[in-house]
Image: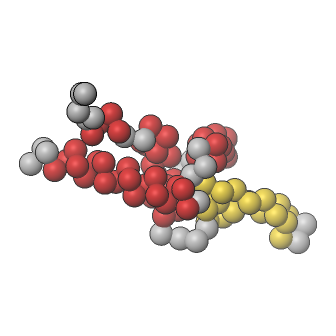
Amino acid sequence: MAKRRLHNQIDEVIHQRTRLAIMAALAGVKALDFAELKAQLGLTDGNLSTHLAALERAGYARITKTFKGKKPHTAVAVSAKGRRALASYVSCLQGILDKAT
């Protein structure tokens, strides 16, 4: 049986640069406000929404829509599955980089 190559194990959902930045921004916090995340990463509403939808479909992010007073509020958090996926992604990249030294 062929040996599995580390580069073939990279999670393509996370590996996309904007989604990686989103996951990294969310990893150290309980949740972030949509507007706060958008400002941190310098994204447009549409761009952030599209990438969050991909992360949500994969089960990596949770998006909660509520109201604060009469204003809509969107909070974004990494799910437990997303935390595990990010840890696995980082480990995979570290394994690849270890071979480069």
Which picture quadrant has residue 3? top left
Is residue 85 shown left or right of residue 46? left
Q: Is residue 22 left or right of residue 11?
A: right
Q: Is residue 8 above or below residue 88?
A: above
Place of residue 53 in the rendered image (x, y in percent of width and height, measured from the top left): 65, 43
Q: Nearer the viewer, residue 15 or 25?
A: 15
The residue shown at (16%, 50%) is 98
Image position of 81 (left or right of 8): right
Residue 16 locus on image (x, y percent): 45, 39
Furthest residue in direction right, as rendered: 70
Name the one closer to the observer, 70 or 75. 75
| Residue at far left of view | 101
- Residue placed at 55% from the left, 62% from the top? 80
Instruction: Name the quadrant containing residue 76.
Output: bottom right
Q: How many marks?
A: 0
Image coords of residue 40 (percent x, y): 53, 59
Instruction: Report whether 71 appears left or right of 37.
Output: right
Q: Is residue 31 visible?
A: yes
Identify the residue shown where x is 49% and y is 40%. Answer: 13
Q: Quadrant of the N terminus?
A: top left
Q: Residue furthest front?
A: 1
As displayed, is residue 88 above or below residue 9? below
Determine whether 78 is above or below 89 in the image. below
**Residue 38 can be seen, yes or no:** no
Residue visible at 35% across and 39% down in the picture: 9
